Image (cartoon, rainbow, N blue to C red):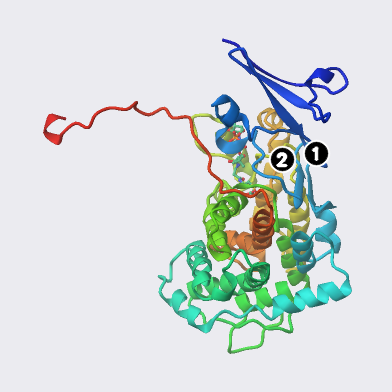
Amino acid sequence: MSQSITADKPDTNKSRADEGGERMALLIVDGEEYELPIRKGTMGPEVIDITKLYRRSRRFTYDPGYTSTASCESKITFIDGANGKLLYRGYPIDELATHGNYLETCYLLLFGELPNKAQYEEFANRITYHTMLHEQMNRFYTGFRRDAHPMAIMVGIVGALSAFYHDSTDIYDPEQRMVASYRMIAKMPTIAAMAYKYSIGQPFIYPRNDLDYAANFLHMCFAVPCEPYEVDPVLARAMDRIFVLHADHEQNASTSTVRLAGSSGANPFACIAAGIACLWGPSHGGANEAALNMLEEIGTVDRIPEYIARAKDKSDPFRLMGFGHRVYKNYDPRAKVMRQTAHEVLDRLGVKEEPLLQVAMELERIALEDEYFIEKRLYPNIDFYSGITLRALGFPPEMFTVLFALARTVGWIAQWREMIEDPNQKIGRPRQLYTGPVERDYVPMDER
Ligand code: CMC
């Protein structure tokens, strides 16, 4: 039995182009030939369109972990992993993080273009005036144990939004989809700050409409009712930049979760709650917390070789957290900006020597010179320096993934809307390679 697949070069094998000149890949299974259209995006690898393969060949493709699968068509975010590039709607992440701000980035992700001044002001105004939470939601928080992980609270509260905002759950109404988008982006800082305040036993601080997005968030987290609290503009700018860096990242696990949940017609709040649940895992958004814990465990520069050896040892499950990425096989462009931000925050706070930053920089240096990491193309990812930065800003490790979720909400919402507005959208329904028992007869209990 022979199976082969070939993607034809248009100039060398015209017979494999269909009548309209479309290029085709040829799949041969047991002597049967199947022509599969090759589709080209504006950038990135071409795809072989297998949507009709099952109907024609009665065979599925097999790709657990989706390493070779493009799950959708999208115009939002592009990653060139080999060259360490990340573009939101065509704009490089470092330019947006350096020259733009988070709300501008949100507008860009949602609507496809950077806003002009009037558009920006209108958008910022809309977000600002949706920041308050329904007062009754406070009772949800008090139902949680004080020691609940704030991500557990986030999953619960965000899912519960659909019980409070009935006028923005009809996914077939474009106006309601828009209102849900504004609500999600606007309320996430409030929800996240309340989760934090609850965990430390302090009263909730209401949003302040005179502050910008990041400053308002810092205020809700760190102000207390009994004394004035001034937000440091340098730290607010750093917070804003961290939000920009996390705003979207193509079809990662949580975004794919949001799309899959949304494909069944579930309301946007439920879909974002699903995304938050997925983000929580240590291989995804939970890695920033895990990376800081690892740096703390290493503690001093002299212990680094021991941990490098453990990361390389196949019999040890330990991995260098904040290192490696499914898509980036080069330096994560977000990690570069994050490293710079870590230095800026520490400078501003007057921290002359941060032992964890020293451990991180030395760990990075040693790993990048080590054959194992070079050969597997493992570089620091965004989470490697984010924990140090967030801790310096005053957040405990349990809040790191919450901040990631806050910032990623716009990406989830933009991707969810793109999916809903796609006329070819269908419910996501993967198939499987079944390896369980073949059909057999029920055996009564006393005969087993
Ligand atoms: N430390 C040591 N070895 C590693 C690491 C690491 N951090 N990452 C990958 N490897 C090795 C892995 O053992 C495997 O080796 P081999 O081929 O000999 O079996 C090889 O590199 C490929 O790894 P993989 O697990 O097949 O790659 P993946 O694409 O499935 O995993 C990853 C990507 C991010 C889950 C993984 O690199 C990892 O676990 N990193 C640590 C966790 C982390 O920092 N996650 C944050 C990702 S960025 C934030 C986000 O987007 O959510």
Q: Label 2 sits on what residue type? A: Tyr
Q: Position of residue 289 (x, y in %)?
A: 57, 55
Seen in the image, is 42 located left or right of residue 263?
right
Quarter of the picture holding the C terminus = top left
Helix, strand or loop status at disc 2: loop
- Camera-nearest residue between 364 and 143: 143
- State left or right for residue 215 relative to residue 9: left
Residue 352 in view in this figure: no
For residue 145, which quarter of the picture?
bottom left
Residue designated by label 1: 83
Task: Give the quadrant of the N terminus.
Answer: top right
Q: Quadrant of residue 307?
A: top right
Q: Rate crowding at label 2 as few (under 14), some (14 to 19) or many (20 or more) other CA atoms within 10 Å.
A: many
Q: Earlier in the sequence, mark 1 or mark 2?
A: 1
Q: Is mark 2 within 8 Å of ligand 1?
A: no
- In the image, 159 versus 53, the foreground residue is 53
Q: Is residue 444 above or below residue 380?
A: above
Regarding residue 80, the answer to whether it shows in the image is yes
- Asked if residue 225 is positioned above or below residue 142 in the image, the reply reads below
Q: Of helix, strand and loop, which one carries label 1?
A: loop
Marks 1 and 2, Cα distance to the nearest angstrom? 8 Å
Report the residue at 58% width, 68% height from top. Answer: 170
Q: Residue shown at 83%/64% (left/top)?
A: 100
Residue 148 appears at what percent x and percent y?
44, 66
Q: Which residue is mark 2?
A: 328
- Horizontal and vertical percent position of residue 203: 52, 82
